[in-house]
Amino acid sequence: MLPSVKSTPKHLRHPLTSKRQHSNRPYVGLPSYETISRRFASHPNPVQFFSRKWTKDSGEIVDIHSVDNDDPHGYDVLIPDINQKILANELSEVAGVKYHSVATEKDANEVVDVGKGFVFGRNSRLMFPCVVTYRGISRWVFFLADTGAPRTYLSTESCKVFGITRDDIATPVKIAGYSHPSFMAPYGSYFEEVDILGTDFMTNFNVVMWTDWDSQKVAFLFGRDWNFPVRKNLK
């Protein structure tokens, strides 16, 4: 015979109540893969939760979607395996398109849904060849996709091609058909010869990089409504 409510210990009468309570903090559990999975499936999103918390604690107001007033000289990175010579030769050979070659009107007007890229060199650089347009000039540019770069940069040579002369403010260009403010790589920086696709661009257009390490191919998926393809569909 099942015990009555009266005979059931008080702390066991409503055992599920605590699990149904909603929290304004991310899920917390014992150290496990399940905890990590549940934490990032919970509400609020832990990344957004702590970003807001840290911003509030510091007293700063930060808009991650705005890079117009950022200091482009506040970032530098050593990329010794990519320079203008390699872009014009080895990378152009792999891409099948000459670096800085003139793009057709059709390619210049295309808004890319799935960009085709590749893994390059012993340092496994993720490269994205695409058309950049500025003031009627459309050329092929090979971006290094760098999730460690907060901003998007055009190399000093690319800026010469487009007639961009300011390195202290962002210049509105089109990258793969998407309007986005980009900076000139600072003169004297370690990466002044490299075009870098930064997290500002990836955030604004929700770019997902899908890498097939076996085939050394990379798919750049734009937008939010993607059913992720299996590996064979990228080959």
Image: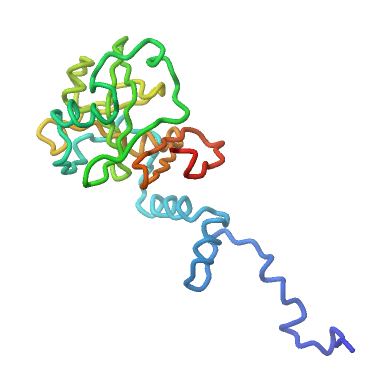
The residue lying at 76 percent from left, 88 percent from top is 9
Percent coordinates x, y for residue 69 in the rendering: 29, 31
Q: How many marks?
A: 0
- Nearer to us in this view, 55 or 29: 29
Q: Quadrant of the C terminus?
A: top left
Q: Is residue 208 above or below residue 140?
A: below
Q: What residue lies at 47% left-to-right and 50% top-to-bottom?
A: 48
Give how far across and how far down residue 10 sits, in percent: 75, 85
The spot of residue 168 in percent (x, y) is 20, 27
**Residue 21 figure quarter:** bottom right
Q: Is residue 56 left or right of residue 160?
A: right
In the image shown, does 217 or 7 lie closer to the viewer? 217
Residue nearest the viewer, comparing 83 with 150: 83
Quadrant housing the N terminus: bottom right
Residue furthest right as drawn: 1
Q: Residue furthest left?
A: 188
Q: Position of residue 136 (x, y in %)?
A: 32, 9
Colouring mode (rainbow / by chain / secondary structure / one colour): rainbow
Q: Which of the 4 image quarters holds residue 53? A: bottom left
Q: Residue at x 84, y 83 (%)?
A: 5
**Between residues 168 and 100, which one lies in front from this camera angle?**
100
